[in-house]
Image: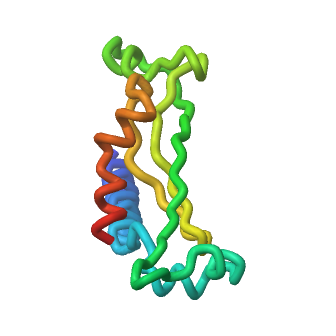
């Protein structure tokens, strides 16, 4: 029995180490590309349409909301907070952004009991976009 416990601990240790590597990689990725990178990587038709005018850099990031299906929760609060009549099931809602160069960014997941307008106002990604 001690050898099984030891192997289980090693597997758990390896799992947590891999998870830590994944989290460190995600944290190191930038959320948005800078204007110069965006301009260099996007198609030339976008450079013509969205070029710098009077010193103002035009940076387009298209945002949309998505529903991500999940299993049915046993806890009533989670069931209530994630059930959507629109999607006819439990799901989370998150923001997905795409820059003209093809860079895709994801924002945090929320329960679906929030409207798209409230998510856009409260999630903070529009402020982050302006700062970046």
> Percent from the top left, x then y, of residue 109?
40, 41
Residue 15 drawn at (x, y percent): 39, 58
Q: Residue 125 at x, y = what percent?
A: 35, 54
- Could you say which is closer to the camera, residue 33 or residue 73? 33
- Residue 122 locus on image (x, y percent): 29, 41
Q: Identify the residue shown where x is 60% and y is 17%.
A: 88
Q: Is residue 103 left or right of residue 57?
A: right
Query: What residue is shown at x 40% (from left), y 84% (from top)?
Result: 55
128 vs 32, left or right, is left
Q: Is residue 112 above or below residue 123?
A: above
Nearest the eye: 90 or 124: 124
Picture residue at 43% right of the left edge, 83% below the top: 54
Seen from the viewer's position, the closer of residues 47 and 86 is 47
In the figure, residue 103 lies in which quadrant? bottom right
User: Which residue appears at 29% of the width and 57% of the height?
Assistant: 127
Note whether residue 94 is visible. Answer: yes
Quadrant of the image occupied by residue 6: bottom left
Which picture quadrant has residue 48?
bottom right
């Amino acid at each position: 029995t001690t050898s099984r416990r030891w192997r289980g601990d090693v597997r758990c240790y390896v799992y947590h180490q891999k998870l830590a590597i994944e989290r460190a990689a995600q944290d190191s990725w930038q959320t948005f590309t800078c204007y110069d990178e965006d301009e260099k990587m996007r198609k030339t038709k976008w450079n013509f349409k969205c070029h710098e005018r009077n010193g103002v850099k035009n940076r387009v990031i298209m945002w949309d909301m998505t529903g991500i299906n999940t299993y049915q929760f046993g806890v009533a609060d989670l069931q209530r907070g994630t059930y959507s009549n629109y999607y006819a099931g439990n799901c989370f809602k998150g923001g997905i952004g795409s820059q003209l160069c093809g860079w895709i960014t994801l924002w945090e997941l929320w329960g679906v009991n929030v409207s798209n307008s409230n998510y856009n106002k409260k999630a903070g990604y529009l402020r982050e976009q302006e700062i970046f």
